[in-house]
Image (tube, rainbow, N blue to C red):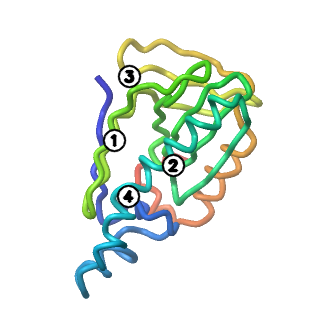
């Protein structure tokens, strides 16, 4: 079974701003409650992005979108993944153009995703290791350069202490 992750104060904000949660939505929440529409939009942004991603995968189209520390991407083979760049977690959301069941629980205060793999980028390959059985798979056709650049950008954006707080290993 994959692991789930709660958004902590030092984690990247799930709204996609690129800021830490404590510097973004946590402060907004403490100052005033969000309008109902904003609250609803924040609750479903990951699910909506996954739906868009699965449509791209069904159309066998390349796609890459970076929102905060989350990378959403699809390949011409119809595969699609959600990757969390701070902890290097990933979950496949489509295979051969077909959407897969993915555990995503979102509320205003919480984002839990049923991560199934750890990932790394090796050259032009997206390499995943299954949490379930430890199997390692190299995926061709994934946006390895974009993922590496995004991870490197995250490492440049945060101090060494902040990287330790969000579990990104240098």
The image shows residue 13 at horizontal and vertical percentages of 41, 64
Mark pair 3, 1: CA separation: 17 Å
The image shows residue 145 at horizontal and vertical percentages of 75, 41
Mark pair 1, 2: CA separation: 12 Å
Mark pair 3, 2: CA separation: 24 Å
Kind of element beneath mark 2: helix
Q: Dot 4 corresponds to which residue? A: 165
Which badge, 1 or 2, is on the more N-terminal residue? 2
Kind of element beneath mark 1: strand
Which badge, 4 or 2, is on the more N-terminal residue? 2
Q: Residue at x 58, y 32 (%)?
A: 80
Q: Nearer the viewer, mark 1 or mark 4?
A: 1
Mark pair 4, 3: CA separation: 22 Å
Q: Nearer the viewer, residue 88 or 113?
A: 113
Residue 166: numbered disc: none
Residue 131: numbered disc: 3
Which badge, 3 or 1, is on the more N-terminal residue? 1
Q: Dot 1 corresponds to which residue? A: 104
Q: Are marks 1 and 4 in contact (CB under 8 Å)?
A: no
Mark pair 4, 2: CA separation: 26 Å
Kind of element beneath mark 4: helix
């Amino acid at each position: 079974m994959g692991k789930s992750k709660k958004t902590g104060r030092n984690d990247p904000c799930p709204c996609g701003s690129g800021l830490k949660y404590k510097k973004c939505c946590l402060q907004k929440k403490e100052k005033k409650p969000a309008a109902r529409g904003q609250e609803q939009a924040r609750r479903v942004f990951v699910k909506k992005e996954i739906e868009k991603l699965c449509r791209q995968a069904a159309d066998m189209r390349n796609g890459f979108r970076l929102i905060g520390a989350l990378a959403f991407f699809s390949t011409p083979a119809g595969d699609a993944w959600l990757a969390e760049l701070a902890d290097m977690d990933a979950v496949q959301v489509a295979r051969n153009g077909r959407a897969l069941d993915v555990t995503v629980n979102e509320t205003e205060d919480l984002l839990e995703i049923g991560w199934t793999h750890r990932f790394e980028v090796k050259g032009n390959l997206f390499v995943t290791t299954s949490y379930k059985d430890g199997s390692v798979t190299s995926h061709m056709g994934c946006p390895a350069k974009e993922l590496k650049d995004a991870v490197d950008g995250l490492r440049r954006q945060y101090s060494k202490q902040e990287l330790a707080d969000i579990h990104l290993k240098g």
